[in-house]
Image (cartoon, rainbow, N blue to C red):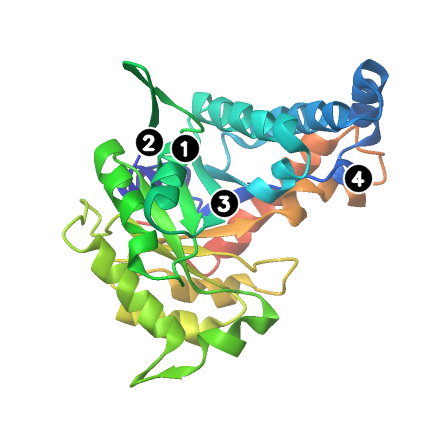
């Protein structure tokens, strides 16, 4: 599912947002944890099954509001193989609900290792005479700061499976400027990475004009975002940093083109943990998450019109 597919889903729901699914056990409502621990004990399996129940409920509550979800691999890896199995289930369930799935994996390595990652997350793994999809995400996030050869296997997997990727370009964290804002020749490093993203995707533009290689551009640096939007006309943006990190709807408007296309804004904690602010001990976590997602959508609509 390419960026054309994502843009179609955004247009259909008039909502350019993605809900992050990054749960720690302590962020899961107590009644879900209690039921899981009663069955599996206070074990990694118990925590993983609680995450699965929580994710299912969030997806059910959000699937007619948001066009996409973004599970972050680290929160599943910290629960071992049981957590990764839950991530696999979560991706499959979200796709069943017609949601676009961005696997936030931020991988970056060379040669056969990069190929193995691409097979696992976007392509297929060959077993004997058969080939099997593994995590089967629609899109992944990648760290390309080791160079273009770390990304090329993913580009080929995207072409083969009509999928797409996001490269870290200008990230939302406070320390991003330590390297990304350094001068490299006649450009800043993050602009070098943006130009590399455009080069990797060249020739794969879809009907909305975006190629298969997108860019992660943080909401916390709106002036840089605005400049990158002008520089990278055919690059789709994933925008972290809205909400808990301080980015606003007014800031993220600069990620979009004149048609309100070409970007999707992420929020994780503000949606996932909305139940913690209602005073009802999490029994209303689905309603709270849905209300937070609607509020985010409506906030961004004040500044972005999707045609």
Q: Residue at coordinates 39% horizontally, 43% vertically from top-left?
A: 113
In the picture of the structure, the residue carrying the numbered disc 4 is: 26
Q: Give whichever of discs 4 and 3 has the lower sequence position.
A: 4
- Hey, which residue is sitting farthest left in the picture? 203
Q: Nearer the viewer, mark 1 or mark 4?
A: 1
Image location of residue 10, percent across then percent down: 38, 42
Mark 2 and mark 4: span between their CA atoms? Answer: 33 Å
Q: Which one is nearer the viewer's eye here, 72 or 282?
A: 72
Asked if disc 2 and disc 1 are in contact, CB closer than 8 Å, the reply is: yes
Image location of residue 59, percent across then percent down: 57, 29
Q: Which one is nearer the viewer's eye here, 238 or 260?
A: 238
- Tell me the crowding category of disc 4: few under 14, some 14 to 19, or many 20 or more residues within 10 angstroms, Cα based: few
Q: Give whichever of discs 3 and 2 has the lower sequence position.
A: 3
- Residue 305 sits above or below residue 206 on the image: below
Mark 3 and mark 1: span between their CA atoms? Answer: 13 Å
Left or right placement of residue 61 versus residue 42 in this view: left
Q: Give whichever of discs 2 and 4 has the lower sequence position.
A: 4
Asked if disc 1 and disc 4 are in contact, CB closer than 8 Å, the reply is: no
Mark 2 and mark 1: span between their CA atoms? Answer: 6 Å
Q: Which mark is residue 123?
A: 2
- Tell me the crowding category of disc 2: few under 14, some 14 to 19, or many 20 or more residues within 10 angstroms, Cα based: many
Left or right placement of residue 273 versus residue 67 in this view: right
In the picture of the structure, the residue carrying the numbered disc 3 is: 104
Mark 4 and mark 3: span between their CA atoms? Answer: 21 Å
Question: Which image quadrant for residue 135?
Answer: top left
């Amino acid at each position: 599912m390419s960026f054309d597919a994502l843009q179609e889903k955004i247009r259909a729901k008039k909502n350019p947002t993605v809900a992050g699914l990054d749960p720690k056990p302590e962020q899961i409502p107590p009644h879900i944890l209690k039921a899981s621990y009663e069955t599996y004990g206070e074990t990694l399996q118990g925590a993983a099954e609680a995450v699965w129940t929580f994710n299912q409920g969030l997806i059910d509550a959000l699937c007619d509001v948001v066009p996409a979800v973004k599970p972050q691999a680290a929160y599943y890896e910290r629960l071992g193989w049981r957590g990764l199995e839950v991530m696999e289930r979560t991706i499959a369930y979200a796709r069943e609900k017609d949601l676009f799935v961005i696997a936030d994996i931020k991988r970056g390595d060379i040669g056969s290792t990069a190929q193995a990652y691409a097979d696992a997350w976007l392509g297929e793994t060959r077993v004997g005479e058969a080939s099997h999809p593994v995590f089967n995400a629609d899109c992944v996030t990648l760290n390309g700061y080791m160079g273009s050869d770390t990304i090329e296997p993913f580009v080929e997997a995207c072409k083969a499976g009509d999928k797409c990727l996001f490269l870290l370009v200008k990230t939302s964290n406070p320390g991003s400027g330590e390297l990304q804002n350094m001068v490299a020749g006649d450009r800043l490093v993050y602009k070098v990475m943006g130009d590399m993203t455009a080069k990797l995707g060249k020739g794969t533009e879809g009907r909305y004009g975006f190629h298969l290689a997108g860019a992660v551009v943080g909401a916390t640096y709106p002036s840089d975002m605005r400049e990158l939007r002008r520089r990278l006309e055919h690059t789709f943006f994933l925008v972290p940093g809205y909400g808990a990190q301080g980015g606003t709807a007014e800031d993220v408007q600069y990620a979009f083109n004149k048609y309100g296309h070409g970007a999707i804004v992420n929020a994780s904690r503000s949606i996932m943990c909305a139940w913690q602010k209602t005073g009802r001990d999490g029994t209303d976590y689905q309603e709270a998450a849905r209300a937070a997602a609607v509020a985010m959508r409506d906030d961004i609509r004040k500044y972005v019109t999707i045609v």
